Amino acid sequence: MRVFLKINGVLYEVEVEPRRLLAHVLRELGFTSVRIGCDTATCGACTVIMNGRPVKSCNILAVQADGAEIFTIEHSDEVMDRLKEAFKRNHAAQCGFCTSGMLLTAYHLLKRGVKSEEEVIEGISGVLCRCTGYQNIINAIKEAAGL
């Protein structure tokens, strides 16, 4: 099947098998920041923004994303750049495996107007980090949100 994906502002036309996962297609297109951690939509390392919402791309077929607008960590705008800088300043990444999923989830939180630390904690609960203990990640998101 032929699908059209707008990824980080660029339109891609891709031929895919109907059962092919979006995470695999994105990686094949060179977006290797989309990590495949668990293949069960549990860890969140594969999170991307699709049509304005964070989704776990290991749980979505590429054909389901036909016509979608997708942002990966390579996306750049004022909000994403502010988040990346806050993550650096707060040492919010260690091994880096979950970082793109965390950043994209945090991006969604900032875009919708997160207002408290509790919202940050709840908002990132779908992305697992095995290294940082989360506090530096929470601090970075709060900084970027101006909390």
Image (cartoon, rainbow, N blue to C red):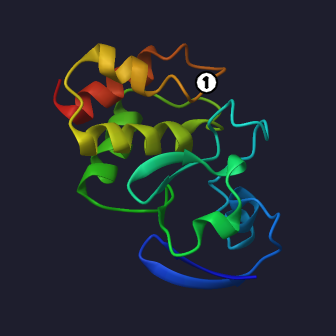
Question: Residue 38, how many percent across, how many down?
Answer: 78, 36
Residues packed near mark 1 inside 10 Å, few (<14), some (14 to 19) or many (20 plus): many
Q: In the displayed structure, would residue 34 be above or below residue 41?
A: below
Judged from the image, the secondary structure of the residue bearing numbered disc 1 is: loop
**Residue visible at 49% across and 69% down in the picture:** 68
**So how many labels did they put on this image?**
1
Considering every residue shown, the one lying at the far left of the view is 146
Q: Quadrant of residue 120?
A: top left
Q: In the displayed structure, would residue 114 be above or below residue 55?
A: above
User: Which amino acid, by three-letter code, is at mark 1?
Assistant: Cys
| Residue 54 appears left or right of 65 | left
In what quadrant of the picture does the N terminus appear? bottom right
Q: In the displayed structure, would residue 63 be above or below residue 51?
A: below
In what quadrant of the picture does the C terminus appear? top left
The residue indicated by pointer 1 is: 129
| Residue 147 appears left or right of 85 | left
Question: Residue 45, how many percent across, how many down?
Answer: 64, 40
Question: Residue 11, how many percent across, how many down?
Answer: 50, 83
Q: Nearer the viewer, residue 61 or 96?
A: 61
**Residue visible at 63% across and 64% down in the picture:** 64
Q: In the displayed structure, would residue 144 be above or below residue 46?
A: above
Q: Quadrant of residue 114?
A: top left
**Residue visible at 24% across and 56% down in the picture:** 78
Q: Nearer the viewer, residue 98 or 92?
A: 98
Question: Residue 101, how many percent across, how many down?
Answer: 55, 41
